[in-house]
Structures are given as structure tokens and as C-alpha cells.
Amino acid sequence: MSGPPPFEWLDQQPYELMWQRLQERADAVASGLGAEVIWACEHAPVYTTGRRGVDNREQPTLPAPLIHTDRGGETTFHGAGQLMFYPVIHLKQRHISPKAYVRLLEQSCINLLAEYGLTAERRCSLPGVWTNEGKIAAIGLRIREGVAYHGMALNVKVEPGWFAAINPCGTGLESINLENYIEDIPEMSGLAKRWQRHFAAVLSSN
């Protein structure tokens, strides 16, 4: 298997419907009945938690629904102003280990942010992408039958109050927006397309 998967911008999608769509495509890719794809979108406000179901709420009632998912990771927020990047990739056929794939995804986001003059990095044992001020992108994956789905969430212009209701990823560190660093925020669809190009570049160099 070679070459990058096709890309599609899906605008705003309900989280649960998108999750179902990801599962169905991952199953199709695993069975050879479907092709890899990269989807990007925004979600209506929702909190999600991973398979471990870690409760890291900072208040008893969350201001949006909480959904228990099949991905890895702890409770986080998804909503308007956050860019969701969802590759469905056959890691086994591409000979990419899960650990290498996490680094590949992170690197694609780091390279995207560098395009806007922002220096971002990984942090040891803390998945995602970070600046000196806090976490700017979160990662949560599920790998089933050699196929990876779910993906990354980049904070572009998220209202901070949504994250105030939780302890993001259990770190106690602040979640940061891209708009904290640049004045002219690009359209989400254009930003997603740029991310896709960076992802395709690191995927092809693997």
C-alpha cells in the first residue's frame, strides 16, 4: 500500500454519527471492502472519554453531553473552534507500528503549526502536541485488526470555558488555542487541507 489516502472535509458533524462512520470505515478497510480515508470536521459541543472511562471532571455537571467511546485516552472536549483530524489507516499493511503512528500524527500537527510560525513539541509520556503554555492538540486512537481510527483534535479557537469543566488528560495543564499565537485564523476547511498535506508527507516518508 502506497500513497496518501483521499481527503474529505465534512464541515460540522454530530460526534456519535461520526464515530459510527469511523468504525464502519475501519471495518471495511480491515476486510478489504473499503479504502483508507482522511476525514476532517468540527463537532457540536460534547465531552468524550476513552475505554478506561477516567472521570476527570472538575465539576459535578458538565455543560455538554458525555459519551463513552472506544478510543484510548481520558476525558476531553470536542466542539466548535476545534479541528478534528480523522485518518482511517491500515497500519498493518503499511508496516507502521502503533507507537510510530502516534509520532507520525503528532509530527504532522507540529509541522502544520510551524507553517504558522508556532513552535510546538511532544512531551515525554504525554501524547499530543504542546507549546510552552500548554496543550494545543490531543490524540486518541483505536486500533482494530491492524486499522487505526479516531485521531487528533487541534484547538483553534475553542471557548476556554469548555475545558474549565475538566482536567484535560489528567495533567492539570492548560489547553491552548492557535488563536493565542496568530492574528489571522484560517478557515477550518483550509487548515484541515494543510494538515492533510503535512500528514501525507510524513506518511510517505515513513
Image (cartoon, grey):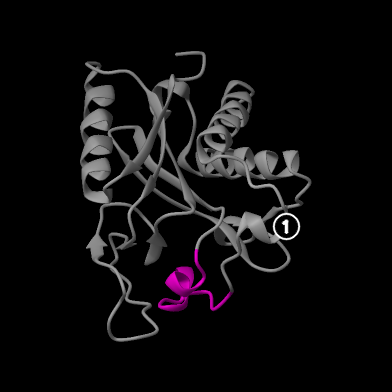
Q: Mark 1 belongs to which amino acid?
A: Tyr
Residue 144, image x, y percentages: 28, 38
Q: Secondary structure at mark 1?
A: loop
Residue 69 forms part of the magenta stretch: no
Relative to 104, is 120 on the left or the right? right
Q: Is residue 166 magenta?
A: yes
Q: Is residue 105 or residue 57 the one in the foreground?
A: 57
The relative height of residue 66 versus residue 113 in the rendered view (above or below) is below
Magenta residues span 159-173
Relative to residue 144, is residue 82 drawn left or right? right
Residue at the outermost top position: 2
Q: Residue at x 40, y 84 (%)?
A: 58
* Residue visible at 39% across and 57% down in the picture: 78
Is residue 185 among what the camera can see?
Answer: yes
Indicate the position of residue 184 as horizontal and vertical percent values. 69, 47
Whether residue 74 is visible: no
Q: Classify the position of the C terminus by image quarter.
A: top right
Label 1, residues with CA under 10 Å away: few <14, some 14-19, many ≥20: few
The structure residue drawn at horizontal position 31% and vertical position 61%, both measured from the top left corner, is 48
Viewer-proximal residue among 152 and 144:
152
Residue named by callout 1: 181
x then y, percent, for residue 75: 37, 67
Question: Seen in the image, is 74 located left or right of residue 124?
Answer: left
